[in-house]
Image (spheres, rainbow, N blue to C red):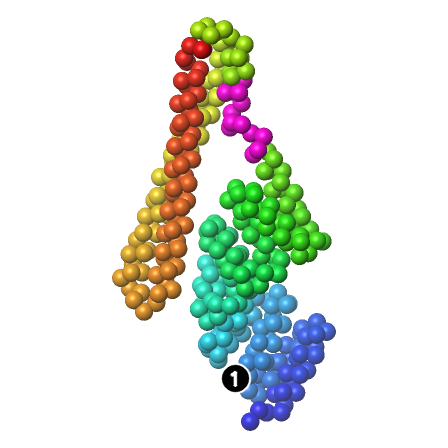
Amino acid sequence: MTNPDVDRFCQQGRALMKSREYDGASDAFADAVALDADCCEAHEGLATCAFASGDYPAAIDQFLKLTLLQPMESRYYTNLGAIHNRIGDYMKACEYLRKAIQRNKKCAESFYNLGIAQRKLKQNTMAVSAYKEALKIDPMMVEAYQNLGNVYVDMGNMQMAITNFKKALEIRPEFEKARAGLEKAEQQHEIAKGRNTQFGRLNAIESTVSNVTVGETRELREDERLEDRNCIRQMSEEIERLAKGCVEHLRIHLIPAVLEVERAMATSADDKFELVEAADLMKTATHQWTALRRTLKKKVSELADHERFVNQPIG
């Protein structure tokens, strides 16, 4: 039977929270807990007041107590994930948010907060999937469209970024963050469309070729030689940087991801979620590795084409 004094203190706490009198609300909920240490409503009230007051350690402590009292309740894990996002502990946030999703796969807030954490961890492909899941559950979650647009900007996919910023503005036309994101993405998209090559040298040479008789060769002026050497130097430095990036990605991300899959396969027979998580990490690492290799190959080809074009007789 519920203690009537516990109910009275909880009612006082709720009323004070509505008035944003968080200190008084906390006192009321604490009085309720003193009478009933297992009162979930009182612990949740204490957690909410602590979060609203910026006392994140106290909020974490109360939500952890709630996970012990109601271990299958997903929203406590979602709130723990959101708080850890707020304090910048994104790995811990992912841990709690995956526990929330294990308990409730239909909570848009869990996937939304997971997307935030994964973007901060540079796991952009996984963040895209998380935001898409959130929007599948709640198609009107305007912040998810805006954040998804930001992830696509990070990935260099301006067309998809523009699409998602526009969806956010369709739902909330006054959403300034989405409008600013849209303007930035459109500007970068226009710049990309107007850029024929990374370096301007090939275009300049082609315009010169059109004015030269077939079969002629033309000596480059000294300023053109200098420009050409600078162009080749920039290309070479970019190729070297990309090559080092490929090696680093292989060492830091891809090999550890493969080893993690092997470990999960050997140890997680009863925990399929751990295996799926490891497989997702390897998939992300593999996609990034493929993209790096493709970019490196393209740059090497650009350098070879440039050398052939400059050195061969015109015509």
Question: In front: 259, or 147?
Answer: 147
In the picture, the quarter occupied by the C terminus is top left
The residue positioned 56% from the left and 43% from the top of the image is 159
Question: Horizontal and vertical percent for residue 295?
Answer: 42, 35
| Furthest-bottom residue in this view | 1
Whether residue 75 is visible, yes or no, is yes
Residue 136 as seen in the image, left or right of residue 273: right
| Furthest-front residue in this view | 214
* Residue type for callout 1: Asp
The residue positioned 70% from the left and 71% from the top of the image is 20
Which quadrant of the figure has residue 15? bottom right
Q: Which residues fall within the magenta stretch?
A: 192-204
Secondary structure, mark 1, is loop
Q: Is residue 51 magenta?
A: no
Disc 1 target residue: 38
Q: Residues within 10 Å of mark 1 (few under 14, many from 20)?
A: some
The residue positioned 67% from the left and 54% from the top of the image is 170
Residue 188, placed above or below residue 76: above
The residue positioned 57% from the left and 33% from the top of the image is 193
Question: Horizontal and vertical percent for residue 304?
Answer: 39, 23
Residue 48 as seen in the image, left or right of residue 296: right
In the picture, the quarter occupied by the N terminus is bottom right
Residue 171, placed above or below residue 295: below
Question: Horizontal and vertical percent for residue 24?
Answer: 68, 77
Whether residue 88 is visible, yes or no, is no
Question: In front: 159, or 31?
Answer: 159
Residue 120 as seen in the image, left or right of residue 49: left
